[in-house]
Each structure stands twice: as C-alpha cells, then as structure tokens.
Amino acid sequence: MSFCASQEPHLWAEQHFSGAEMSDVRRTDRLVAIAEAMAATPGGSIPTLFAHPYAIKAAYNLFKHPDATPDNVQAGHRDLVLSEMHTPGVSLLLEDTTELSFSGRKPVPGLGPIGNGAAGLQGFFVHSVLGVRWSAPPSDAQSSRRPAVGVVGLCDQHYYVRKPRAQGTPRESSQARKDRERESHKWEHAGQRIGPAPEGVRWSRVGEREADIYEHRRSGQVLGHGFVIRAAKDRAFCHPQTGERAGRLFEVVRRTAP
C-alpha cells in the first residue's frame, strides 16, 4: 500500500523502490534514500531534504541519469500496486494527463510545445493512472457518509513530448490523423500496459471528458475493465440485435429515471 503517516519512511522506501530497474545497485540505493527523505518530509525541495551537499548533488545526478525513467524508477512500486489490486474487490483506476511547464524565452532541448503552442510555452505531458480501493458502502442505512477510498499507488505513468508542426506544413486531413499514432492513444496504451483484470476482481477506469474516446472504451472492454467517463460527445445508440439506430446518448439519459 502507499505511504501513510503510521509507516516508517525507510521501510516504506525499501518496499516500494528497492525493486527499481537500475543498471547499478548504487543507483537503486540512492533512489531508496531519496524516497525515504521525501516520505519523511513530504513537499520539501531537494536542497531541504538532505543535510550534506554531496547527497543533494547525488540526487540531481540520479534524476538526470538515463536510467531514471518513470518505468525504471517505479518498477517495484507498480508491481506492489498491481499485486494489491489482484485481491478480490473493486478498484478504481483514476487517470488524467498533467502538463509540466518549463516555459521561458530560451528553448530547452528535449521539450516541446504545450498549451496553445504560443512562443515560449514549452514542456511535456505526463499521463498517470492512480489505483484506489473502493470500499463497500456501510450497512447502516442511517450513515450519510461513504467510507474513504484507500490509495494503493500508481498503476502506470508515462510521458510524451508534443512535436511542433514545421512552419509552412499544411494541416493533416482527418484520414491522415486516423492512420498515425495520436496523443489520444495514451488512454488505450495505459490500459494495455496495466493488463487485463483478473478473474473475480473489478477494475473501473475513471476519466474526464478527454477520455471519451471510442477506442479507449473498446480496448477496456477487451481487457475486462469497466469505466466511468464524463461524456463529451452525443454518441449514437444502436439496437444490440438489429444494429439500427436507437436514439442518441444525451437524449436517452435525460429521459431515464435516476
């Protein structure tokens, strides 16, 4: 399970990060030390986490090393999270994309456009899937409060850099966009990286309007994932037997009893 105040920071760091996939065991040890310091002082900046300048420099050196990718750093943590989510019950997979900005007048190598692509706006995107355990509602009908979900941890996290369109290049046709890799595939890829839901366990993907993508829901059904997604498009309904159109989403929902 994820870190809580009752856990000892060193034991938690060992449990979640000793399984990191680093090419040198010394980098794994350094990662555990950094995780322990962060758990002991949540929200603290790197210079305030360590007493010695050497430890501060070692932390920055690790972060810029090619080994320090989300997949490598989180390998052990994700294994623990998926193991916990394989136990019987209901888990919610909460996912969204974060825009990380390093905007400024000078371009930074390795970054791409963000926001509306205006001059100086640069950074990259991180798509995260957070696993939480969904507890059964209380049996006491008088209780008005639902029990809090328990945070398990990150099931998946990957980043991508948006490539700018070269000046003078015409916009792609809709067909051309369909035939190439698109940012919207991040939802589908996240599900494939997490894998199918095990027998007897329910996983439900939870997303905002950006997740209202047909391919995302279809791939989720293949993997045995449920979903709760805020609707963005007034999609057509089809009769399951005849295939004929049977209304549209917003119309059908509005006339359906709660």
Image (cartoon, rainbow, N blue to C red):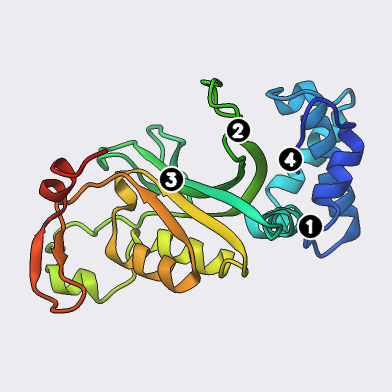
Which residue does the image show at 83% across and 31% down from the upper left? 37
Amino acid found under the numbered disc labelled 1: Ala
Assess whether mark 3 and mark 1 are in contact (beta carbons under 8 angstroms).
no
Mark 2 and mark 1: Cα distance apart in space: 41 Å
Q: In the image shown, does 86 or 181 lie closer to the viewer?
A: 86
Amino acid found under the numbered disc labelled 3: Thr
Q: Position of residue 217 (x, y in %)?
A: 35, 63
Which of the two discs, 3 and 2, sits closer to the camera? 2
Which residue does the image show at 36% across and 63% down from the upper left? 216
Please give left or right for residue 138 compared with residue 109 in the image. Answer: right
Residue carrying label 4: 2
Badge 4 crowding class, 10 Å Cα cut-off, few under 14, some 14 to 19, many 20 or more, is some
5 w.r.t. 167: above or below: above
Please give left or right for residue 206 compared with residue 153 in the image. Answer: left
Please tell me which of labels 3 and 2 falls first in the chain. Answer: 3
Q: Secondary structure at mark 2?
A: loop
Residue carrying label 2: 139
Q: In the image shown, does 239 or 112 lie closer to the viewer?
A: 239
Which of the two discs, 2 and 4, sits closer to the camera? 2
Residue carrying label 3: 97
Mark 4 and mark 3: Cα distance apart in space: 21 Å
Please tell me which of labels 1 and 4 falls first in the chain. Answer: 4
Please tell me which of labels 1 and 3 falls first in the chain. Answer: 1
Badge 2 crowding class, 10 Å Cα cut-off, few under 14, some 14 to 19, many 20 or more, is few
Give the numbered dot on residue 20.
1
> Quick one: quadrant of the C terminus?
top left
Mark 2 and mark 4: Cα distance apart in space: 27 Å
Amino acid found under the numbered disc labelled 2: Ser
